[in-house]
Amino acid sequence: MADIGSYLKKHTEALVKDVGIEAACQITGKSKATLGRYYSDNAEHADRFIPVDAVARLEGAASFPHVTSALADLKNITLSYDGSRSEVSRPGGVNTDVIALSRRFAQLMSEYQDAIADGIITVNEAKRLLKETVLLQQVLIDMKLHLEEESA
């Protein structure tokens, strides 16, 4: 457990430094001392970790989701990060998502059919399939978020 704690503290520090200590204080409403305790390797602060709501706010302002990425690494999960997407890039609703999902899946199947036609999937074909898979995943995430908004 000590290794996990140290790993998370290092990524918490990277997150705070990415945003900047002054900005991090404003975003989280925490003092410099409190933020420092969250990533301190002193024994007296070994059991102190940054709250998840503070992580979410800081990662919204950061250039990279440092702590989220670290948590994914600990569970052997691979994340696909697209810094160009934001919450405002989710226009429409569930009906729009269903249509987009159908189109994306059709595009993926078309790419797959083209790739497998000769019995060999080349590196370039695999890259196109991966791109389509990521785009399909993004549509599913948008759909999930819209469903959560509508059910709240």
Image (spheres, rainbow, N blue to C red):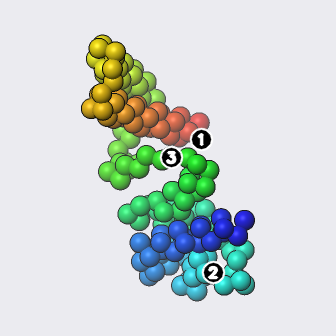
Is 136 rendered above or below residue 120?
below
The answer to whether residue 26 is left or right of residue 84 is right
What is the secondary structure assignment of the residue under circle 1? loop
The quarter of the rendered structure image containing the N terminus is: bottom right
Q: CA distance from mark 3 to mark 2?
A: 27 Å
Is 19 or 2 nearer to us in this picture?
Answer: 2
From what the image shows, is residue 74 above or below residue 54? Answer: above
User: SS of the residue at dot 3?
Assistant: loop
Camera-nearest residue between 2 and 123: 123
Residue in the picture at 36% in, 38% down = 91
- The residue sitting at 61% across, 76% down in the picture is 38
Label 2 vs label 1: CA separation? 40 Å
Q: Earlier in the sequence, mark 1 or mark 3?
A: 3
Q: Amino acid at mark 2?
A: Asp
- Residue labelled with disc 2: 41
Q: CA distance from mark 1 to mark 3?
A: 29 Å
